[in-house]
Image (tube, rainbow, N blue to C red):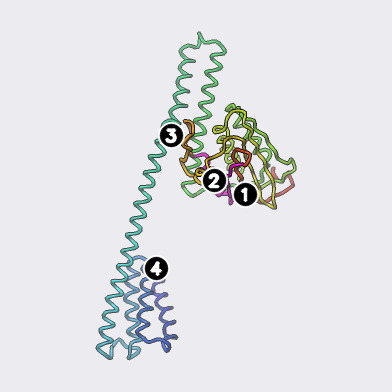
Amino acid sequence: MQLLYSILSVGIVSVACHFLSEYMGYRVVAFVLLITVSLIAMFFDILPVLLTAILTALTWDYFFIPPHFTLQVASAEDGILLSMYFVIAMVNAVLTFKIRQAEKEVRRKEKRAGAVKLYNTLLNSLSHELRTPIATIIGAADNLQANNARLTPQHRHELINEISQAGLRLNQQVENLLNMSRLESGFVQPKKDWCDINEIVYDAVRHIETNGVSQHIHININPDIPLFRLDDGMLEQIIFNLLNNAVKYTPADTRIDIAAMCYTDVLQLTIEDNGPGFPEQAISRVFDKFYRLAESTPGGTGLGLSIVKGFTEAMGGRIALENRKEGGAKFTINIPAETSYLKNLKNE
């Protein structure tokens, strides 16, 4: 296919030069043909590039160098020019191709180095986060097995609760890894269906409250908000991660507000708190993979907000973070989507 495109390119350029030949000399045509060789070398493999170089030399000789329509050259000067053109075209083709190959190799090495760096960062970030809940589960389970007869009901309840909390924490880390893997693969495709925003928000809040939170979560959604055609799994994960981030990094008794509004087929979600907010220099980086604030408490992998951004953009939306004037942080998400006020469509 590249060979065919090369031949077609030479033909099209030659025809164009034929019609313009009365305005420019045949020596200028050589420069146009050399540009064609360079352009082909920027995109095609070496064989089509060499073919292009040979074809342009023959085309210039046959159609443009006097006498026309013959491979003979009338003057020694034109013969030297033709020989130089052929050499320059071949060298230009090979060098341009080699440069392109070298650039590809550099990009490949950079990509590999980035993958190694990502792998090492991932291992370093997760070594504690995965090991801690696993150790908690094993320790609590061992206590239940070894000392079950001597444990009071209160102690058993506490150990079971530790296992449950550690299991939820471990599950969240695995969910984040799987979600980031989906985003990194580039094959995230939203599975859109009619979604009830009230249900999704309340489910995410119930999910976060199973971990036991000391903050006060307030929901402000109009019961008559329309259905939106979105990926409900992605949307719930977005809300959960934002709530989880607010719960982890705000003091006890902080107020967290969730609001959802509809603006002409755009779903706008806001999650804000009256906590300490973010340092101004960190706002532009909080959505980067593995980024965590310098004063963050131990725990967490820095994947939660990057997953929020990835899922939001996968659904065609945008997310923004700002500090509130009253104090605290505010996340705003806008996702364009089809809407319907017919609630029964949800069950179709």
Q: Amino acid at mark 1?
A: Ile
Give the residue number, with chain letter if any, for mark 4: 2
Q: How many marks?
A: 4
Point out residue 307 in the picture as x, y percentages from the top left corner.
52, 42
Secondary structure beneath disc 2?
helix
Q: Nearer the viewer, mark 4 or mark 3?
A: 3
Q: Write the residue at 39% across / 77% down.
A: 10
Q: Residues within 10 Å of mark 1 (few under 14, many from 20)?
A: many
Q: Is residue 220 left or right of residue 26?
A: right
User: The C terminus is located in which quarter?
Assistant: top right
Give the residue number, with chain letter if any, for mark 1: 335
Camera-side residue: 344 or 129?
129
Point out residue 41 in the picture as x, y percentages from the top left corner.
36, 68
Give the residue number, with chain letter if any, for mark 2: 309
Give the residue number, with chain letter if any, for mark 3: 126
Q: Is residue 301 left or right of residue 213?
A: left
Examine the rendered structure and indicate whether residue 236 appears above or below residue 157.
below
The alpha-carbon separation of the residues under discs 2 and 3 comes to 21 Å
N-term mark: 3 or 1: 3
Q: Is residue 278 left or right of residue 36?
A: right
Q: Write the residue at 47% across / 41% down.
A: 291
Q: Amino acid at mark 3?
A: Leu
Q: Write the residue at 36% across / 44% down.
A: 116
Q: Amino acid at mark 4?
A: Gln
The alpha-carbon separation of the residues under discs 4 and 1 comes to 41 Å
Q: Residues within 10 Å of mark 3 (few under 14, many from 20)?
A: some
